[in-house]
Amino acid sequence: MAAQASQRLEGKIAVITGGSNGIGLATARRFSAEGAKILIADLQSEPGRRAAESINDSGGTAHFVELEAANEEANYAMAAAAVEHFGTIDVVVTAAGVSGGDYNSGDIEGGLKRMAKAAEAAAVNPAASLTELDIDDWRRVLDVNLTGTLLAVKATAAVMLEQEKQGSIITIASIAARDPLWGAPSYPVSKAGVWMLTKNAARTLAPLGIRVNSIGPGFVDTNMTAAFDQVDEIYDSVIAQTPMGRKGKPEEIASVALFLASDDASYVTGELIHPDGGWFTG
């Protein structure tokens, strides 16, 4: 059953990076249903434009801009576009991210090849994910997931401060921020960094009226996890470690983002909330 809209974001302007699919798109749609105008920023131009068009066709208001998350100039251009089109920024969600250096959203075949290659390397050298780590892969993941989050926060917070506005910034981390999981360290390290960045930004910006919180989803049904479903051993392991016995839905993460964006969370800052199906209950 779809969540009932309550107009909790009426009149708000929300910037959402990585808004063309998955958690970002679900959040954009939910925020729009709650009364916000949406700026979708994403590297993928066509899916991003379609996402904005789908919101406009549903009676909402959305605009798309292309964004290379790790590019500082692009992030400032994104913030400027929000001001140009909507006048201000009230809410930010940083959903742009990659799971590996050569990750392409929606490329399930590529994901399966990466997993097979990692499994073959591990069979020969159990420490291959660390000792044979491709440093370019490491840099790309850290650039997009961590530096990209910093740049988005930096650019959008500057607008809020210049306009002397209160606001809410929501970063997307992961259960990997607290659990190294398996495989290469790049992704969990990047998400742990997002968590510490969130706490630092929250401490810095709280006296100025800006709340900063993070969401650390468990395994959610998105393009990033789609390849896992094709490998029984991995899928079964994920489900076995999730007490609720299923992957989450992007809309369920969007509901947490809505809480953090709204006045219902007016005394909440510097927190990491895990909608994870019970992953951390053990």
Image (spheres, rainbow, N blue to C red):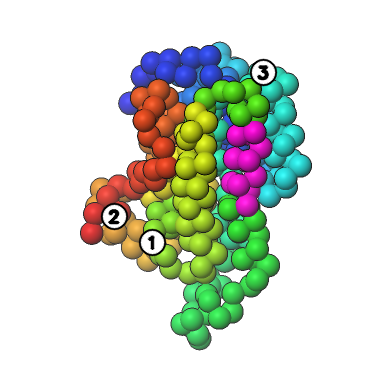
Name the mark nearer the viewer: 2 or 3: 3
Whether the residues at callouts 2 and 3 have beta carbons within 8 Å, the answer is: no
Left or right: where 35 falls relative to 109: left
Foreground residue among 69 and 155: 155
Give the amino acid at mark 3: Gly
Q: Secondary structure at mark 3?
A: loop
Residue 87, label in figure: 3
Return the residue found at the far bottom: 124
Q: Position of residue 249 (x, y in %)?
A: 40, 40
Distance in Å between CA atoms under marks 2 and 1: 9 Å
170 over 198 or under it: above or below: above
Q: Give the residue number, with chain letter if any, for mark 1.
A: 179
Q: Which residues are magenta?
A: 147-158
Type of amino acid under label 2: Phe
| Residue 111 left/right relative to 179 | right
Main SS of the magenta segment?
helix
Give 272 or 27, whichever is nearer the viewer: 272
Q: Are marks 2 and 1 in contact (CB under 8 Å)?
A: yes
Residue 152 covered by magenta stretch: yes
Q: Amino acid at mark 1?
A: Asp
Q: Residue at x 74, y 34 (%)?
A: 77
Residue at x-position 56% and y-position 73%: 117
Label 2 sits on residue: 280
Disc 1 is placed on an element classified as loop
- Foreground of the two, 122 or 134: 134
